[in-house]
Image (spheres, rainbow, N blue to C red):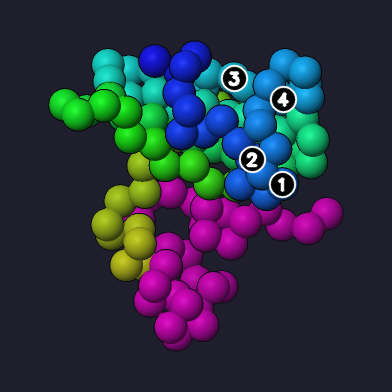
């Protein structure tokens, strides 16, 4: 599915074509049924990009976005448990009330909201 897709053939940052000659790195992160996730690093400007590709009844549909993740980080985040609606609401409340020092009500650690502590 990924080899001959023209929708992601150019870098959104520098508009150069992804190819072996400009040393773009294209990696298949996951593929499940009609869905694939591809990580691309532009050979020209080195900007990483994550592309979600879906095979539909009328052809391929893709959604690409520039990211700051390398291939391994992408694989890690893809395998994580999705964020629940309750977690989104909890973060929204914390942002609105500026309450980041309180323990979140859901079962995961507050490091998920606050990020890692500085050493």
- The CA span between labels 4 and 2 is 10 Å
Write down the residue under mark 3.
27
Q: Is residue 27 above or below residue 103?
A: above
Tell me the residue at 35%/58% (across/down): 87
Which segment did they paint magenta? 91-119
Check disc 2 and report its element: helix, strand or loop: loop
Q: Residue 57 magenta-drawn?
A: no
- Quadrant of image for the C terminus: bottom right
Foreground residue, 118 or 69? 69
Write down the residue under mark 4.
24
Q: Residues within 10 Å of mark 1 (few under 14, many from 20)?
A: few
- The CA span between labels 4 and 1 is 12 Å
- The CA span between labels 3 and 4 is 10 Å
Q: Is residue 36 above or below residue 89?
A: above
Q: Residue 101 magenta-drawn?
A: yes
Foreground residue, 86 or 76? 76
Write down the residue under mark 1.
14
Q: Foreground mark, 1 or 3?
A: 1
Write down the residue under mark 2.
11
Check disc 1 and report its element: helix, strand or loop: loop
């Amino acid at each position: 599915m990924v080899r001959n897709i023209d929708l992601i053939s150019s870098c959104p940052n520098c508009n150069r074509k992804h190819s072996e000659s400009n040393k773009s790195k294209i990696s298949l992160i996951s593929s499940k049924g009609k869905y694939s996730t591809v990580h691309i690093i532009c050979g020209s400007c080195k900007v990483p990009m994550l592309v979600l590709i879906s095979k539909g009844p009328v052809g391929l549909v893709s959604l690409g976005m520039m990211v700051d993740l390398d291939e391994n980080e992408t694989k890690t985040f893809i395998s994580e448990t999705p964020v629940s609606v309750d977690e989104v609401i909890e973060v929204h409340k914390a942002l609105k009330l500026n309450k980041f020092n309180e323990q979140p009500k859901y079962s995961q650690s507050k490091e998920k909201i606050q990020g890692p502590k500085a050493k």
